[in-house]
Image (cartoon, rainbow, N blue to C red):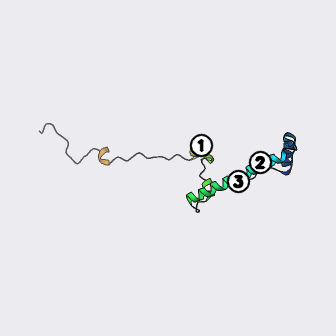
């Protein structure tokens, strides 16, 4: 993981720390910082090993990064959906017997009854 720190930036941070903390206490602060970084690294390794214990070794962490919900921008999803051609749904077809009158049966004649 790179934070974009160059040699010049590290030198500047060290110089500011020397001025703020003082030359007497700077080695103690540097040792505390080293212990903190070591502890954080150990915690990250422990979390990764617990994850692998829970889900197995065949789980690829790169594949899980693809499932990160923060990568899905709702605005982009809606914009992409609006760009697509709308799906046209045809109305259901009605059977012919319901649309046309039945001409095979004789018409009802009220006088013949």
Q: Residues within 10 Å of mark 2 (few under 14, many from 20)?
A: few
Of callouts 1 and 3, which one flags the residue occurring earlier in the amino acid sequence? 3
Of callouts 2 and 1, which one flags the residue occurring earlier in the amino acid sequence? 2
Q: Are marks 3 and 2 in contact (CB under 8 Å)?
A: no
Q: Which mark is residue 74?
A: 1
Q: Residue 3: percent from the left, percent from the top? A: 76, 49
Q: Residue 110: percent from the left, percent from the top? A: 15, 37
Residue bearing the label numbered 3? 41
User: At 67% across and 52% down in the image, what residue appears?
Assistant: 43
Q: CA distance from mark 2 to mark 1?
A: 43 Å
Please state which of residues 21 and 17 is positioned toward the viewer in this rendering.
Answer: 21
Q: Which mark is residue 14?
A: none
The image quarter in which residue 47 lies: bottom right
User: At 16% across and 39% down in the image, what residue appears?
Assistant: 109
Q: CA distance from mark 3 to mark 2?
A: 14 Å
Q: CA distance from mark 1 to mark 3?
A: 34 Å
Task: Tell me the SS state at disc 1.
Answer: helix
Q: Is residue 17 left or right of residue 86?
A: right
Of labels 1 and 3, the one closer to you? 3
Q: Residue 17: percent from the left, percent from the top? A: 84, 43
């Amino acid at each position: 993981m790179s934070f974009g720190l160059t040699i010049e930036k590290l030198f500047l941070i060290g110089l500011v720390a020397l001025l703020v903390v003082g030359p007497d206490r700077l080695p103690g602060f540097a040792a505390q910082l080293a212990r903190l970084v070591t502890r954080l690294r150990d915690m990250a390794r422990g979390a990764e090993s617990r994850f692998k214990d829970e889900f197995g070794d065949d789980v690829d962490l790169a594949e899980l990064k693809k499932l990160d919900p923060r990568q899905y921008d709702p605005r982009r999803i809606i914009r992409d959906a609006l760009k697509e051609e709308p799906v046209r749904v045809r109305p259901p077809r009605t059977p012919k017997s319901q649309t046309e009158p039945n001409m095979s049966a004789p018409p009802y004649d009220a006088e013949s009854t």
